[in-house]
Amino acid sequence: AQAALLRFWEDLRCDELSVRPMTTVDQTRSAVRAFSACVKDKGASSCAAERAAVVSGISSAVKGECAPYTEDFFACFSHRYRLSTCNDATVGKLLKCQEQLSGTLLATK
C-alpha cells in the first residue's frame, strides 16, 4: 500500500507540472463533465487537454481536502515509521480520503 501511495504522489507531481491546478471543486466537476462530453463526441484520444484539467483539478482538491492525512503520512515517512502514532491506519486514512474524494468528483454527471 505504501509503494502504491508513493507512485500516486509521484504521478501527481508530474501531472501538476504540465497543467495549471484548479482551485475549486465546482471547477473540477465542470472539467469532469467537459471531459465526458469530449470523450463521447470525439473519443478519448482527442481529449488530452480535458483529461489534464480533470487530473489537475482532482489532485488540487485531494491536496486540500486530505491535507491532515497527508501531513500524518509524511511525518511517519520522514521518521521511518518509528513514531508511536504510525501504523497501517495512518496510510489507510489517507488512501480512504483520496479514494472517496476522487470517486465523488469523477462520479459527477
Image (cartoon, rainbow, N blue to C red):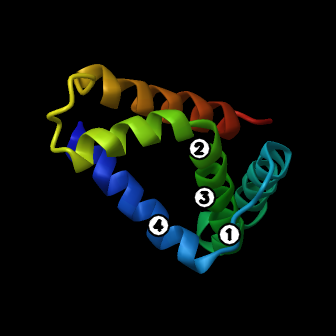
Residue at x 81%, y 56% (from the top left corner): 34
Q: Nearer the viewer, mark 3 or mark 2?
A: 2
Q: Residues within 10 Å of mark 4 (few under 14, many from 20)?
A: few
Q: CA distance from mark 1 to mark 3?
A: 12 Å
Horizontal side, residue 42 vs residue 63: left or right = right
| Above or below, comparing residue 3 to residue 50 in the picture | above
Decide which of tag 3 and tag 2 comes sooner along the chain: 3
Residue tagged 4: 13
Q: Position of residue 48 (x, y in %)?
A: 63, 72
Disc 3 target residue: 55
> Do the residues under discs 3 and 4 have CB atoms within 8 angstroms?
no
Above or below for 16 versus 86: below
Q: Locate the N terminus by quadrant.
A: top left
Instruction: Kindly identify the amino acid type of the residue bearing the numbered disc 3.
Output: Val
Name the residue: 68% across, 69% down. 47
Q: Residues within 10 Å of mark 2 (few under 14, many from 20)?
A: many
